Image: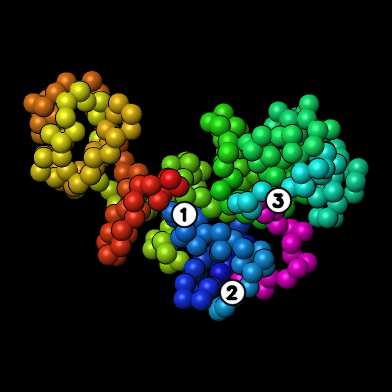
Amino acid sequence: MLELVNITKRYDTLTAVDSLSLRIEPGGIYGLLGPNGAGKTTTIRMIMGVIEPDEGEVRIFGEPFTERLKDSIGYLPEERGLYRKMKILEHLVFLGEIKGLSAGVARARGKKWLERLDLGGWAEKTVESLSKGMQQKVQFIATVLHEPRLVLLDEPFAGLDPINTQVLKDIIEELQADGRTVVLSTHLMEQVEKLCKRICLIHKGKKILEGSLADIKMTFSRNVVTVRFSGDKAHLEKFPGVERVRAFGQELTVTLAAGTDTNAFLAHALEGGRVERFEIGEVSLHDIFISKVKEEGGEVSDEAIQGR
């Protein structure tokens, strides 16, 4: 469906994408993941022909990229690109016609999608009257209106509240179930852990990890414990085998080295405070990424991954 062969993009002394190769098979949801500035958007723009790689080749549907292939691709860019003075439904019809739809078909599909995304009452309003989240939903509709075979989504959840984020996730899964291929580019790794079967992690323009998410998690298996703990976090960090302690509200996620005795860790925790929850789970994609970057001698902060 999509193949990148050693694509590279440089801007003066900065190499934004460094000899990146990917092969994405049809019919799945593929995650292109990494912190802000990793090179994800540059990669998506090279796939779409917005910019050309300095080296390497992009192949779509088994052939080199050409303008005529664009009608079979849906592209949701990271930045909003709607005409602010146009009415919503009029705008969707306009964008649908650009992709080869008749005005009638574009109008019918646009109305259906607006209702689906709770925007039916806004069809005759102008783009500038919408909130950022509502504009994001309109752009998403424009991305899938022509029923593309390949859907490229660059930070699709930006500006959406949790309810609308879940609605979009459900639609992405429906697209995949309908046989379409989705490439999901995001820095919010927890958003795609349940969506993607295959992923690629990139950092500073380079691929550092690629493959089946299940296989990757098996390779990086560690004991990860969720603890609701009333004591001092530093007490937990003193236990031998603790690699990382991260706070999420009232709960802590503790990553333990392979072979660490979780019962002994629980006993240690009880010595330092009250334990109201103790649950053993799998390592997160976030922690796998941190581990892989450090393994290669790099550093990346939680703030970079979360986009703060």
Instruction: Using the image, tell me which numbered label, if any, was put on residue 53.
Output: 2
Q: Which residue is mark 1?
A: 36
* Amino acid type indicated by mark 1: Asn
Between the C-alphas of marks 1 and 2, the distance is: 20 Å
The C terminus: image quadrant = top left
Q: Nearer the viewer, residue 272 or 102?
A: 272
Q: Are marks 1 and 2 in contact (CB under 8 Å)?
A: no
**Is residue 95 found inside the magenta-colored segment of the image?**
no
Q: Nearer the viewer, residue 215 or 210?
A: 210
Q: Which residue is mark 3?
A: 81
Q: Return the disc, 3 or 2, that comes first in the chain's sequence.
A: 2
Q: Return the disc, 1 or 2, that comes first in the chain's sequence.
A: 1
Res 157 visible: yes
Which residue does the image show at 50% across and 62% down from the upper left? 39
- In the rendered image, the vertical position of residue 265 relative to residue 258, given as above or below: above
* Amino acid type indicated by mark 2: Pro
